[in-house]
C-alpha cells in the first residue's frame, strides 16, 4: 500500500503537515508532483467526482482526500497516529484546526490583500499586517498551545506517544523560526514545552532521517512560512 | 440531553453554522451567552483542561468541543446528520473545511491587516482586498461548489437527505447575499443548484420556524458577513 501525495513540488507548504507524520510512522508514499510534475497534479486535482479545491491531496485505492486536518484525521485513525476514542479524536482535530488557523494567519501576513498577487505587490499592507500578527496574534496562539501542553503534562501534546499534533507543532515552530527569527527569539523563553516537543519530534528516527534527506525541501520565499527581514521584529 | 452552545450573543458569526443543523434536526440546545452574558462565556472558555482557543464551543456532559467543522462532525455522527462510512464522513468534513476557508476569506475582506482592529482603521486595505475577492476568489469557490452539487445530482449536496453541509451552504449564500448583494446578483445565474439548496434548507420545518423566530439574530456589521456598500461591486 502506497499513498500518492500531491502537492506543489518546490515548497514545504501545507503538504509538509502531511509528509511529516508519514515519515515519522514509516508510511509509504510517493511525492507525486515531484516525480510527475505540476501538470500531472492539476489533472489529478481536476478529476471528477469529488475533486478537491486545492492541494495537498492524498490518493489511495480510488479515494482522494484533501484538506490537511481531514487527511491527518484519516491517517491518524487508519495508522494509529492519534487517540482512538471519539472524544479524543475530536480533541486532536480541534488542535489541528487551531494550528491551521494560525498557519492561515501566517500566510495572510505576506498576502494580506491579494491572495493571488505577489508579495511585492502588497508590501505596505504586509508590513502593517506583520506588526499586529507578531505583537498580538502569535504570542496569543503560542501561549495557548504552551498552556495545553503544560496541563497535559507528558512528553507529547495529547498522548503518551507522538501523534500528528506533535509533528504539526514541530513544523509550526520550524516555520516560525525561519520566517520570524527575531520574534521567535524573544518568545522562546515563554514556550519551553512547545520547544521541547519540537526537539523530540526532530529526534524521532523517521523524522531525523527525513530531515537529513533531499526529500525535505528547504524553506523558501514561495511557501507559507517566508522570511522577509522587513516583516520580522523583536 | 441539552447542549450548551457558547458564542458571541449579538452576531450570527461562526456560531450560526452550529445553530442551523441543531435547529433543523430539533436538537435541544441553550444559546448560553444570550442568557448568561459574555463574561460567563469567557469563564467557560478559560476553564481547564482542554480550553478552546475561541468561541463557538459546545458543552455536553463535561465535554467541550470547539472549531465549527469539528463540532459539526461530532453532531453529524452522533445525530445522524451526515453519512456514516469513513470515506463519506471525511468527504463531508472536506466540504465543511473548504466552506470554512471561504468564510475566513470573507472575514479577511473587512479585516485584511489587523484582525483585532476595527474595519474603519483598515478601509483602504479592505477596498483592495474586496476587489480580488469578488472578482477571483468568490466565483472560484462558488463555481467549485456548484460543480460538486451538479455531479452529485440529487436535491442535496452529498446525500439523499440534508446534512450539515447543506445547512452550511444555506448560511454561506445568505451571508454573501447580505454582504455583497450586487456581486451575488451577477453570480446567481452561474450557481442555480447552490441556490436550490439554499431554498430547500430555508423550507425545512425546523429552519423555517427558526428563521421566523427571534432566535435568529439579524445580519449586522459586527459579524463575519458585513455589508459595506463601498466593498461591493458587480
Image (spheres, coloured by chain):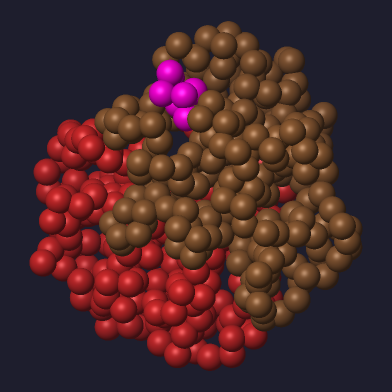
Chain colours: A red, B brown
Answer above or below: position of B163 versus B185: below
Question: In percent of the image, x 30 and y 67: which residue is there?
Answer: A75
Q: Which residues are magenta?
A: B191-198
Total tally of numbered discs in the picture: 0
Question: In percent of the image, x 48 and y 39: which residue is there?
Answer: B166
Question: Image check: A200 left or right of A233?
Answer: left
Q: Nearer the viewer, residue B59 or A112?
A: B59
Question: Image check: B224 left or right of A86?
Answer: right
Q: Nearer the viewer, residue B95 or A46?
A: B95
Q: Quadrant of the C terminus of chain B?
A: top right
Question: Image check: A22 left or right of B102?
Answer: left
Q: Quadrant of residue A163?
A: bottom left
Give percent across and percent down for residue B173: 56, 28
Q: Quadrant of residue B87?
A: bottom left
Q: Is residue B197 rendered magenta in the image?
A: yes
Q: Nearer the viewer, residue A91 or B24?
A: B24
Question: In percent of the image, x 65 and y 34: which residue is there?
Answer: B208
Is residue A182 in view? no
Q: Is residue B22 rendered magenta in the image?
A: no
Question: In percent of the image, x 49 and y 14: which residue is there?
Answer: B187
Q: Quadrant of the N terminus of chain B?
A: bottom right
Q: Main secondary structure of the magenta part?
A: helix
Give percent across and percent down for residue A4: 17, 55
Give percent across and percent down for residue A141: 65, 63
Is residue A17 in view? yes
Residue projecting furthest to the front? B205
Q: Quadrant of residue B176?
A: top right
Q: Nearer the viewer, residue B24 or B234?
A: B24
Give percent across and percent down for residue B55: 70, 57
Question: Image check: A88 left or right of A147?
Answer: left
Amino acid at each position: 500500500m502506497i499513498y500518492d501525495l500531491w502537492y506543489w513540488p518546490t515548497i514545504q507548504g501545507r503538504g509538509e503537515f502531511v509528509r511529516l507524520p508519514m515519515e515519522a510512522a514509516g508510511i509509504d508514499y510517493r511525492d507525486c508532483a515531484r516525480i510527475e510534475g505540476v501538470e500531472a497534479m492539476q489533472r489529478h486535482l481536476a478529476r471528477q467526482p469529488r475533486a478537491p479545491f486545492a492541494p495537498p491531496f492524498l490518493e489511495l485505492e480510488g479515494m482522494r482526500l484533501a484538506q490537511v486536518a481531514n487527511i491527518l484525521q484519516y491517517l491518524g485513525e487508519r495508522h494509529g497516529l492519534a487517540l482512538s476514542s471519539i472524544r479524543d479524536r475530536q480533541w486532536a482535530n480541534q488542535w489541528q484546526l487551531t494550528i491551521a488557523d494560525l498557519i492561515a494567519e501566517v500566510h495572510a501576513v505576506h498576502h494580506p490583500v491579494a491572495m493571488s498577487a505577489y508579495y511585492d505587490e502588497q508590501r505596505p499592507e504586509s508590513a502593517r499586517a506583520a506588526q499586529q500578527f507578531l505583537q498580538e496574534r502569535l504570542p496569543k496562539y503560542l501561549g495557548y498551545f504552551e498552556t495545553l501542553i503544560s496541563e497535559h503534562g507528558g512528553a507529547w501534546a495529547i498522548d503518551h506517544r507522538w501523534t500528528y499534533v506533535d509533528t504539526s507543532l514541530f513544523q509550526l515552530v520550524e516555520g516560525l523560526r525561519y520566517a520570524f527569527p527575531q520574534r521567535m527569539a524573544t518568545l522562546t523563553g515563554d514556550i519551553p514545552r512547545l520547544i521541547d516537543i519540537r526537539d523530540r519530534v526532530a529526534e524521532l528516527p523517521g523524522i531525523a532521517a527525513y530531515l537529513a534527506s533531499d526529500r525535505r525541501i528547504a524553506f523558501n520565499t514561495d511557501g507559507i512560512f517566508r522570511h522577509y527581514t522587513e516583516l520580522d521584529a523583536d
